[in-house]
Amino acid sequence: MKKIIKLGMAALTALTMAGCSSESEDVKTITVGISPDYAPYESENKKGDIVGFDPDMMKCFEEYLSDEEGVTYKLEMKKMDFDNIITQLQGDQIDVGISGFTYDSKRKVEWSDPYLGSSQVAVIPKDSDITSTADLEGKSLVAQTGATGEAAAKEVKDAKVTGLKNVQDIMNALSANQYDAAIVDLGVAKNYVKSGEFKMLDESLMDEQNYIIAKKGNTDMIKKMNTCIKKFLASDDYAKLCKKYDLSPLETK
């Protein structure tokens, strides 16, 4: 009896190993560079999982690509600082970058079609006497290093601009009154205003859209992303996720 059980277990093990081997050959992995300090686009929950609009969108993309090509796709998130994503793309360490990227001609990358509307706005402490973007002139401003918010801040007349890598560090510094205002993405601003510690100026410093990026020359990857974006924008999931995360749907003509 034991011998029969052992033979059965051996056969089961062989089948299991064969199944794993077959699965690994059929799965195509796309590595995604992501900076999870940018809620509601992406952040880490208490378990250390990366959550938010972009990760949820990537799950939809897995389905689209798998259905399109008849092969199982996995989009694997790789956590890194925002200003390292382009470097990692250039070094072939990741396939795409997604972290609320907005168009900047200085970034030598391939750009997907846009998938969200966006803008750069000023967030201030709740007790601040700043009431308009004109009041930002000559003030101390903080923004994320390498982000378009930093470029928008530098356009403010006589402003003293500091760049920090992490948005959480930016908002902690603003909460401690180390700066007069933070220049961040509208979706991020709304997320922090909900805490009650901050308020947001109504005027936009820069109107933008969000994109996925790939290494310069990797047009095949961008074509895959654009195919997915087109399906995503036409899906019910798009409207649901925009509402869930309070982000601006792309305006279509």
Image (cartoon, helix red, strand yellow):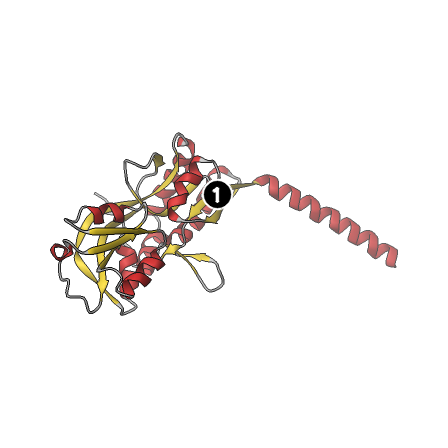
Q: How many marks?
A: 1
Q: Amino acid at mark 1?
A: Thr
* Number of residues whose C-alpha sits closer than 10 Å to that of mark 1, classed few (under 14), some (14–19) or many (20 or more): some
Residue 203 x, y percent position in the rendering: 15, 55
Q: Indicate the quadrant containing the C terminus: top left, top right, bottom left or bottom right.
A: top left
Viewer-closest of 81 and 228: 81
Residue 228 x, y percent position in the rendering: 39, 42
The residue at 66%/42% (across/down) is 21
Residue 68 x, y percent position in the rendering: 46, 39
Q: Indicate the quadrant containing the N terminus: top left, top right, bottom left or bottom right.
A: bottom right
Identify the image quadrant of residue 201.
bottom left
Relative horizontal placement of residue 19, taking residue 96 as reference (left or right): right
Residue 182 visible? The answer is: yes
Viewer-closest of 177 and 237: 177
Q: Secondary structure at mark 1?
A: strand
Residue 180 x, y percent position in the rendering: 21, 60
The residue at 41%/39% (across/down) is 87
Relative horizontal placement of residue 199, taking residue 31 as reference (left or right): left
The residue at 83%/54% (across/down) is 6
The residue at 27%/68% (across/down) is 197
**223, above or below 52, in the image:** above
Residue on which disc 1 sits: 31
Residue sitting at the far left: 134
Viewer-closest of 74 and 169: 169
Relative horizontal placement of residue 92, taking residue 226 as reference (left or right): right
Residue 234 visible? The answer is: no
